């Protein structure tokens, strides 16, 4: 099985992204996390507006207590 063959539904996709970004939030600087989310938004922005909205909210939640 190839990683590209794996299809995730909305809940699975957002759960994976949330866990990954929250884990990064404990290990990386606020600037690195912000940059990573920006790259995800750039890749997904035209395809999935709902995911972009989710990523913006997640960014606010993960970075709310940090200074960029």
Image (tube, helix red, strand yellow):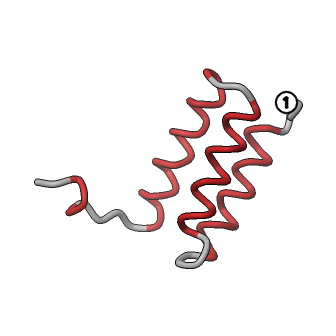
Q: Secondary structure at mark 1?
A: loop
- For the N terminus, give its image quadrant: bottom left
Please state if 18 lies on the left or on the right of 33 as rendered.
Answer: left
Image: 18 above or below 23 = below
Left or right: 31 in relation to 67: left
Residue in the picture at 70% in, 67% down = 53
Query: Where, by quadrant of the figure, is residue 48 drawn?
Result: bottom right
Q: Pick the quarter of the image with the C terminus.
A: top right
- Residue placed farthest to the top in the image? 27
- Residue at 58% of width from left, 78% of height from top? 46
In this image, 62 relative to 3: left or right?
right
Direction left: furthest residue? 1
- Compared to residue 8, the image places residue 30 above or below, namely above
Q: Quadrant of residue 54?
A: bottom right
**Residue 29 position (above or below residue 62):** above
Figure disc tally: 1
Whole-percent x, y for residue 58 in the image: 69, 50
Nearest the eye: 6 or 44 = 44
Is 53 above or below relative to 1?
A: below
Q: For residue 57, what is the image quadrant?
A: bottom right
Q: Residue at x 65, y 25 (%)?
A: 28
Q: Nearer the viewer, residue 16 or 45?
A: 45
Residue at x 73% of width, y 39% of height: 62
Q: Which residue is mark 1?
A: 66
Q: Nearer the viewer, residue 62 or 37?
A: 37
Q: Determine crowd level at label 1: few under 14, some 14-19, many 20+ residues with C-alpha closer than 10 A.
A: few
Picture coordinates of residue 33 (x, y %)? 67, 38
What x and y, as percent, mark residue 66? 85, 30
């Amino acid at each position: 099985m190839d990683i590209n063959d794996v299809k995730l539904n909305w809940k699975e996709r957002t759960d994976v992204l949330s866990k990954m970004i929250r884990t990064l939030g404990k290990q990386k600087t606020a600037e690195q996390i912000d940059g990573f989310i920006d790259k995800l938004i750039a890749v997904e922005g035209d395809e999935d507006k709902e995911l972009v909205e989710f990523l913006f909210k997640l960014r606010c939640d993960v970075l709310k207590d940090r200074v960029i």
